[in-house]
Image (cartoon, grey):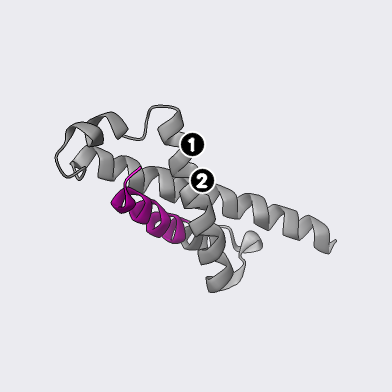
């Protein structure tokens, strides 16, 4: 894994967490909480996608800089979805614990 890909995943995770928090109001953790959980989810989501072979690593390994469009799109998608999913999970757990 290259650092640029990881940074893209983390930033996309933060954005995905904040978007999920805005859409799913009952799971919202606030801007900082959404960002932190999104960053964690972005890193995890991107890693899981790469383990499944959908993370664009084959294309990135063949490219000289690792910044081909396929790898960037895969990192953004994996990070954003991972951040949103983890936020929904953490928000649901938090909501259940408050009852």
Image quadrant occupied by the C terminus: bottom right
Residue displayed at 39% across by 59% down: 11
Residue displayed at 31% across by 46% down: 2
Residue 71 painted magenta: no
Provide the major secondary structure of the magenta segment: helix
Residue identified by numbered label 1: 48
Left or right: 42, with 75 as reference point: right
Residue identified by numbered label 2: 44
| Relative height, residue 48 to residue 15 (above, below) | above
Query: Which secondary structure, mark 1?
Result: helix
| Relative height, residue 35 to residue 6 (above, below) | below
Asked if the residue at tag 2 contacts the one at tag 1, i.e. Cβ–Cβ closer than 8 Å, the answer is yes
Q: Which residues are magenta?
A: 1-16
Residue 12: quadrant of the picture: bottom left
In the image, farthest residue toward the left? 64
Left or right: 56, with 9 as reference point: left
Nearer-the-camera pick, 90 or 20: 90
Q: Which mark, by number, is residue 37?
A: none
Query: Which secondary structure, mark 2?
Result: helix
- Between the residue at mark 1 and the residue at mark 2, the CA separation in whole angstroms equals 6 Å
| Relative height, residue 91 to residue 50 (above, below) | below
Residue 5 painted magenta: yes
The 10 Å Cα crowd at callout 1, few under 14, some 14 to 19, many 20 or more, is: some
The 10 Å Cα crowd at callout 2, few under 14, some 14 to 19, many 20 or more, is: many
Left or right: 58, with 77 as reference point: left
Residue displayed at 62% across by 67% down: 29
Q: Position of residue 38 (x, y in %)?
A: 51, 58
In the image, farthest residue toward the right? 99
| Relative height, residue 65 to residue 95 (above, below) | above
Q: Position of residue 15 (x, y in %)?
A: 42, 60
Q: Position of residue 50 (x, y in %)?
A: 41, 34
Numbered-mark total: 2
């Amino acid at each position: 894994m290259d650092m640029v890909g990881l940074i893209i995943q983390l930033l996309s995770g933060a954005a995905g967490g904040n978007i999920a928090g805005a859409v799913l109001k009952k799971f919202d953790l606030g801007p900082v909480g959404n960002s932190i959980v999104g960053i964690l989810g972005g890193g995890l989501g991107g890693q899981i996608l790469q383990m499944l072979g959908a993370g664009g690593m084959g294309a990135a390994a063949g490219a000289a800089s690792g910044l081909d469009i396929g790898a960037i799109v895969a990192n953004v998608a994996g990070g954003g979805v991972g951040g949103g999913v983890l936020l929904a999970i953490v928000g649901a757990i938090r909501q259940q614990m408050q009852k």
